[in-house]
Image: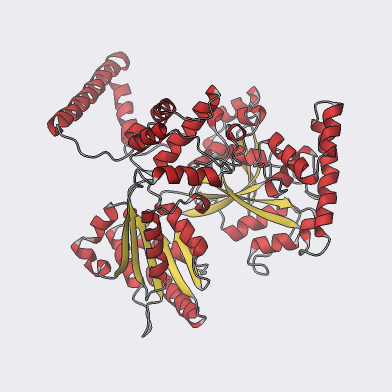
Amino acid sequence: MYYDFFGFKEPPFSIAPDPRYLYLSERHKEALAHLMYGVQGQGGFIVITGEVGTGKTTVSRCFIENAPAHVDIALILNPRLSARELLAAICDELEITNPAGASIKQLVDLINRDLLTAHAAGRHKVLMIDEAQNLSADVLEQLRLLTNLETAEKKLLQIVLLGQPELQQMLALPELRQLNQRVTARYHLDAISPNELPAYLSYRLGVAGMRGDVFSPSAVRKLYRLSNGIPRLINLISDRALLGAYAEGEHELTPAHIRQAAKEVGGSNLGPKPGRAGGKQGFSGYLMLAASLVLAIISTFWLYQQWFGPEAVAESDELVVEQGGTVQRESEPESQVVDNNGDQPGEEQAAGVALPFTEAERLANAAPSELSFEFPEQAQNLAEAFTGLFELWGIDYSPQAFPVACDFARESGLGCLERQGSQRSLMFLDRPAILLLQDDAGNRGYVVLQHLNGGLADITLPTGPVQVPFSSLEPYWFGEYRVLWQLPDHKKSSPVDGEGASEELWIGGRMMELADAHSESLADNARIKRLSGNEQVRWYQSLKGLTVDGIAGAMTIIQINNDLNADVPRLSATRSRSGGEE
């Protein structure tokens, strides 16, 4: 949107935990050093805490990318699990085969055997648990017992706990004193200081491809006051401020841009605030707010009873009980959604395909059993899901013969692409996908999305295809998906001399076709065809809203073949197709 205006290659203030954008302040350097030092030690626990948005997850991703070669890392992102569920999740992350419904003892024995095998091979296992403040005391005690396996020199499992400050309070509980004594390194990650903010902004702008400053000194000071130095809030406010400046045609951000951006994202109310005098006045304000809410509820209840009668009130009470304590996830407004890779689909994709009236009527009158998706009963494991996805491409896949599905894909002339996005991301790629599903109980599973049309999803199960509303999948899908895509000939073999020439020929031929399809005039057509291969790719990437880097990677090749109607399986197709080059 504003990238070309300011000269960015990609969004500089995304809140995704991209290690490339980790600005190593003194505090972040220390946190990373604690992790790097801890895994060289003799096992036990490492604890990293910090306020929401201070960069704990980004530090952990940086550590994972730079961990020593002999270290194997298992990452748990959803720790709100029972002890047995957590042990099963650890087995899954460590790729330990475990039977369904295995007991805690069976799971612990499997993990212990794997740790001994890894130690004999000179490997060191590290378990990282994000959002660890959500672990119960019972689960933490089970984790401590896992670290009991040791040799004469070292413990065989290192556990890293990342969490909010409440984690330290939990570890101080008397019943967890044994675990607390096994913490060999701990660090609390604070917000960045006012003196570090200009360097933080310059670093992220530089990674995004810009050299120079767009923030005026007064804007930087205003930004720090409104964000309190919390990196996530800095990013949210900065991104919105850049959008506001772009809308006004301004190349420099002022305090007014920052102030307006903070209002729009709620930045001034999100960060931790220092304590202020006048506590009684603040407390009375809370009492006034509470009293207003109670009065509004009583008034609504009285009006509802007067209008609809006691029976309706009883039904209303039941509804409140059912929904009480449940956090409902709301999707972003369609007009504001942008794919996580920065792609912004066109108007037709953004709007979606309207359901014909007859189809909408069928959905309204259909029996729930015909349309509902049951999770986890109808979910598959990853091997089953890949088997179904390969089948859509007309390929037989045996997980027993090829345990690593993506290695098998390359041997079959396909590439694997794993991304995080939205429904619009899926439609933008337009390929059948494996969706990762999970619920609040910690159950995880996969489903193969074959087609998506007008809100109806065709999913592939071992028993055959089933059609359900996509909305019935969304409560369990948090954006992670995998797709297959056809490799061009020059990417199917190992790198050899002459591959560059093959790639140029492949790209050159397709760019000729795309120039004919998308040029605005004969003169524009001739201009595009005179460009170098790299410049043609950049032209096409800019046209499609892709990252403009001149490299024909997976996303670019997929979109080229979408434009040229390659004969491959399509998510939006009414029938499965296979073959052809992508």
Q: Is residue 555 above or below residue 311?
A: below
Query: Would you say 260 lies left or right of 455 here?
Result: left
| Residue located at (31% from left, 63% from top) | 186
The one of 376 and 383 positioned closer to us in this rendering: 383
The one of 143 and 513 positioned closer to us in this rendering: 513
Position of residue 543 measured from the top left corner of the image (x, y, whole percent)? 71, 34
Position of residue 215 measured from the top left corner of the image (x, y, whole percent)? 46, 34
The one of 410 and 512 positioned closer to us in this rendering: 512
| Residue located at (76% from left, 63% from top) | 495
Q: Quadrant of residue 150?
A: bottom left
Residue lying at the far top of the rendered structure: 307
| Residue located at (24% from left, 65% from top) | 176
Residue lying at the far bottom of the rendered structure: 152
- Tell how many labels: 0
Q: Is residue 80 visible?
A: no
| Residue located at (29% from left, 40% from top) | 272
Q: How is the image coloured?
A: secondary structure
Q: Is residue 218 visible?
A: yes
Residue lying at the far left of the rendered structure: 280
Position of residue 558 measured from the top left corner of the image (x, y, whole percent)? 72, 45
Q: Quadrant of the N terminus?
A: top right
Q: Quadrant of residue 143?
A: bottom left
Position of residue 426 measured from the top left corner of the image (x, y, whole percent)? 62, 41
